[in-house]
Amino acid sequence: MYQQLKNIEIFNSLSDDSLHEFAKHAQDVNYPKGTILIRADRVEPHFYVLQSGIARAYSDGENQQITFWFGESGNVLFSFNSYINNKPGYENIELLEDCRLIQIKLADLFSLYNGNTEIANWGRKIAEQELIATERRLIDRSFKGAAERYQDFVKQSPALLKRVALKHIASYLGVTQVTLSRIRAGK
Amino acid sequence: MYQQLKNIEIFNSLSDDSLHEFAKHAQDVNYPKGTILIRADRVEPHFYVLQSGIARAYSDGENQQITFWFGESGNVLFSFNSYINNKPGYENIELLEDCRLIQIKLADLFSLYNGNTEIANWGRKIAEQELIATERRLIDRSFKGAAERYQDFVKQSPALLKRVALKHIASYLGVTQVTLSRIRAGK
DNA sequence: AGCATCCTTTTACATTTGTTAAAAAACGAA
DNA sequence: TTCGTTTTTTAACAAATGTAAAAGGATGCT
């Protein structure tokens, strides 16, 4: 397991000692496409790192489903509210392809956080990077039109464009599928 | 300084020992209304906790300025990109009233993070809470219309409503000032 | 291949929001 | 107070996006 983690970029900032500690609690798991790994109405007791495959996080509304996050190889994946507040969350996470993941129990992760300064700072940086990315997306919703947001997405995530249904990309960009079709048609 | 920090809610989760450590590096500072505490084009070397007064973070665009965050008493305040990537950021922070703040050098904060597990986890939780709040706002942009977002803001932040210019609230909600006026007029 | 299902595009129309400009109101300094 | 500045509202029109429904494509299963 240590050797396996060693090859995942997100763990690069950890020393060998910390990585060995982490490895003690980590498992390698596989789930098929379509699995709802995390459900909004449950406290989900695991934290994951995606090794291969892609996933999306979404929230259910009355008439619609909003996809607000895509995960690719190397990204971490967890229920915010389970992780942060130990309560059921607002997000579901669905695997869009067969996925291989590193799994660790939240309880184990928290004891690592509390017992190992380096891992605590590793977790801090993950949250901070995700925060910057989310805030920029929020700002872009105001500064940029839908067409420009789509062009940015195409440039930044060409792989996702090919592998994810357009209806999910539409809601990720904050528009309806009809609007996205219009943008793609160049009108 | 220790006694002063003791009374600020955000420090409640820290033990006395950690708080004493923190207090060694913290200063009490005051700045007048209108101060641009953090500028997008600079690496800002401080981290602040707001004790009194209010502030806003905004980004400059070609024709507009987008306010994407308001800070009230008890909130932390820093340049994301300085703090996280040690690069100039995209955000300015302006004090909207005379403010009293706790100031700590980023370099000192980082050495606290690296030397004190409890403080590292304190910083982790701050980023995580901010991340949840930002993500919910992003999701609300899709699920809710502008009128509902305004009503939510009125309910959740009545104090800000009274103290902040409507033009800033409009951009915070993701609409123009004209649209916000229409919503307020009930049309 | 053939059928059923789901995804994507297109069309027509309704609604929301943006833009520009002007008027009204609020605010601050002398 | 009074003047000048800034903020907020209002109006008219333009542009962007949403909604609903239908048609066309793609995909997967037997």
Image (cartoon, coloured by chain):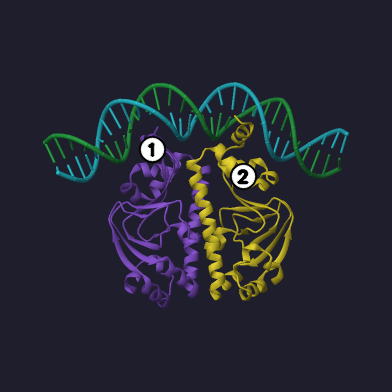
Chain colours: A purple, B yellow, C green, D cyan
Write the residue at 62% across / 66% down.
B12
- Residue B160 as seen in the image, left or right of residue B127: right
Relative to the observer, which residue lies in front, B92 or A121? A121
Q: Quadrant of the N terminus of chain B?
A: bottom right
Residue that badge 1 annotates:
A177
Image quadrant assignment for residue A147: top left
**What SS does tag 1 mark?**
helix
Q: Amino acid at mark 2?
A: Lys
**Mark 1: few/some/many CA within 10 Å (<14, 14-19, 20+):** some
Write the residue at 56% across / 37% down.
B147
Q: CA distance from mark 1 to mark 2?
A: 32 Å
**What SS does tag 2 mark?**
helix
Instruction: Let me know if marks 1 and 2 both belong to one chain.
Output: no
**Mark 2: few/some/many CA within 10 Å (<14, 14-19, 20+):** few
Chain ID, mark 2: B
Relative to the observer, which residue lies in front, B64 or B4? B4
Chain ID, mark 1: A
Name the spot of residue A68 as percent of width and height, x first.
43, 48
Relative to the observer, which residue lies in front, B161 or A134? B161
Name the spot of residue B75 as percent of width and height, x first.
63, 58
**B177 is higher (above) or lower (below) than A95:** above
Residue that badge 2 annotates:
B155
Quick check: can you spot residue B1?
A: no
Q: Quadrant of the C terminus of chain B?
A: top right
Quick check: can you spot residue A59?
A: yes
- Residue A48 as seen in the image, left or right of residue B58: left
**B130 is higher (above) or lower (below) than A143:** below
**A28 is higher (above) or lower (below) than D3:** below
Pair 1/2: label in front: 2
Name the spot of residue B94 as percent of width and height, x first.
66, 52
